[in-house]
Image: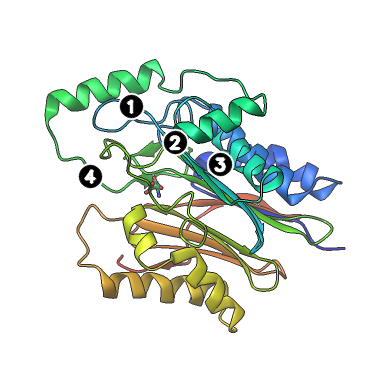
């Protein structure tokens, strides 16, 4: 038996993981729980960078990206979904029902249709209004870094939900779901659905997931690097610190750049870190259900 742990990006995820944690502590599997956490965020219209309510690309078209993973041979992902409100469940179908690990665009939507998932409009009215307002302002497409005040309310426009879990049987799983960067170039895919970038799970070494400026995370295979460092003996905190430092070494950082990670070890140690202040994360275990500040903030 293991001590169950559920950890997720941003304070808005606390009410979600609080509901799911008891299932993890009972007979729930880590995979079912991380999928359900993402599904709840995907349907919450107030979260404007995940699922329904997510902000569209610069042409006003909304696309979703998601991934799930339980081990290096067991992962599934979709990019650029346009007709299904639960990309995380399509990603799980890719993992469980195909020999493949990623499907893209309208063909991924067709695959979801074949498996009976409902086809729906994914651009919400409020996201459309925000896009129309943005079009008027003619401001640059890269939004300022998100500020999380810990109440679940976010200011800015990065808020991918990445969730990591260990269940009572010791199995580990992760999910990551995003509508990507607001006002992106049509066709752009960020880190979230790419295994090793926005999400990586290796039961022998640990798991990590990221949020923020996807291009920066992808440039250093951020989640894989954290897990690899933990596998070589680093604590989650040190692995995140060294990964953020690597990122800062590689990129000429701009003030609008923000990246954050959460990570867990197979034994249930965990940490979070971000490039700049403003990131928070949520943790549920047998002792606590809390929103925490990251222990690592590279540029404070
Ligand atoms: N990481 C996501 C992406 O770049 C966005 C985010 O976390 O808000 O697509």
Q: Which label's residue is closer to the chain start, 3 or 1? A: 3
Residue carrying label 3: 13
Q: Which label's residue is closer to the chain start, 3 or 4? A: 3
Instruction: Assess whether mark 1 and mark 3 are in contact (beta carbons under 8 angstroms).
Output: no
Measure how far apart labels 3 and 2 are at the Cα level.
27 Å
Measure how far apart labels 4 and 2 are at the Cα level.
23 Å
- For mark 1, does the 10 Å Cα neighbourhood hold few (<14), some (14 to 19), or many (20 or more) residues? some
Q: Nearer the viewer, mark 3 or mark 1?
A: 1
Residue carrying label 2: 105
- For mark 4, does the 10 Å Cα neighbourhood hold few (<14), some (14 to 19), or many (20 or more) residues? some
Q: Quadrant of residue 276?
A: bottom left
Q: Which label's residue is closer to the chain start, 4 or 2? A: 2
Q: Position of residue 179 (x, y in %)?
A: 42, 37
Please tell me whether residue 242 is drawn above or below residue 212 in the rendered image: below
Please tell me whether residue 94 is drawn above or below residue 117 in the rendered image: below
Measure how far apart labels 3 and 1 are at the Cα level.
26 Å
Residue carrying label 1: 61
Q: Residue furthest bottom?
A: 233
Q: Nearer the viewer, mark 3 or mark 2?
A: 2
Q: Which mark is residue 142?
A: 4
Please tell me whether residue 60 is drawn above or below residue 34 in the rendered image: above
Q: Nearer the viewer, mark 4 or mark 1?
A: 1
Q: Position of residue 29 (x, y in %)?
A: 78, 48
Instruction: Using the image as rendered, state which of residue 161 and residue 276 is in the foreground.
Output: 161
């Amino acid at each position: 038996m293991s001590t169950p742990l559920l950890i997720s990006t941003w304070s808005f995820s606390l009410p979600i993981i609080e509901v799911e944690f008891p299932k993890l502590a009972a007979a729930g599997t880590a995979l079912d729980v991380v999928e359900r956490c993402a599904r709840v965020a995907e349907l919450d219209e107030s979260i404007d960078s995940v699922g329904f309510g997510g902000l569209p690309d610069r042409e006003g078209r909304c696309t979703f990206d998601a991934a799930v993973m339980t081990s290096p041979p067991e992962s599934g992902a979709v990019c650029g979904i346009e007709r299904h409100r639960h990309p995380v469940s399509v990603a799980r179908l890719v993992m469980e029902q195909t020999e493949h690990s990623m499907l893209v665009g309208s063909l991924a939507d067709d695959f979801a249709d074949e498996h009976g998932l409902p086809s729906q409009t994914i651009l919400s009215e409020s996201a459309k209004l925000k896009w129309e307002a943005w079009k008027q302002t003619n401001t640059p497409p890269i939004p300022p870094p998100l500020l999380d005040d810990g109440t679940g309310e976010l200011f800015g426009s990065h808020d991918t939900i990445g969730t990591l879990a260990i269940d009572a049987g010791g199995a580990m799983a992760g999910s990551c779901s995003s509508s990507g960067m607001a006002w992106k170039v049509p066709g752009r895919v960020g880190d979230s659905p790419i295994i090793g970038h926005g999400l990586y799970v290796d039961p022998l070494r640990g798991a990590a997931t990221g949020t923020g400026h996807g291009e920066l995370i992808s440039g250093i295979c951020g989640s894989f690097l954290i897990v690899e460092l933990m596998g070589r003996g680093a604590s989650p905190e040190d692995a995140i610190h060294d990964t953020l430092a690597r990122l800062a070494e590689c990129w000429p950082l701009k003030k609008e750049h923000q990246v954050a990670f959460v990570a867990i070890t197979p034994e249930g140690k965990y940490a979070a870190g971000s490039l700049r202040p403003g990131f928070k994360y949520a943790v549920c275990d047998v002792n606590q259900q809390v929103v925490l500040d990251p222990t690592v903030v590279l540029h404070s």
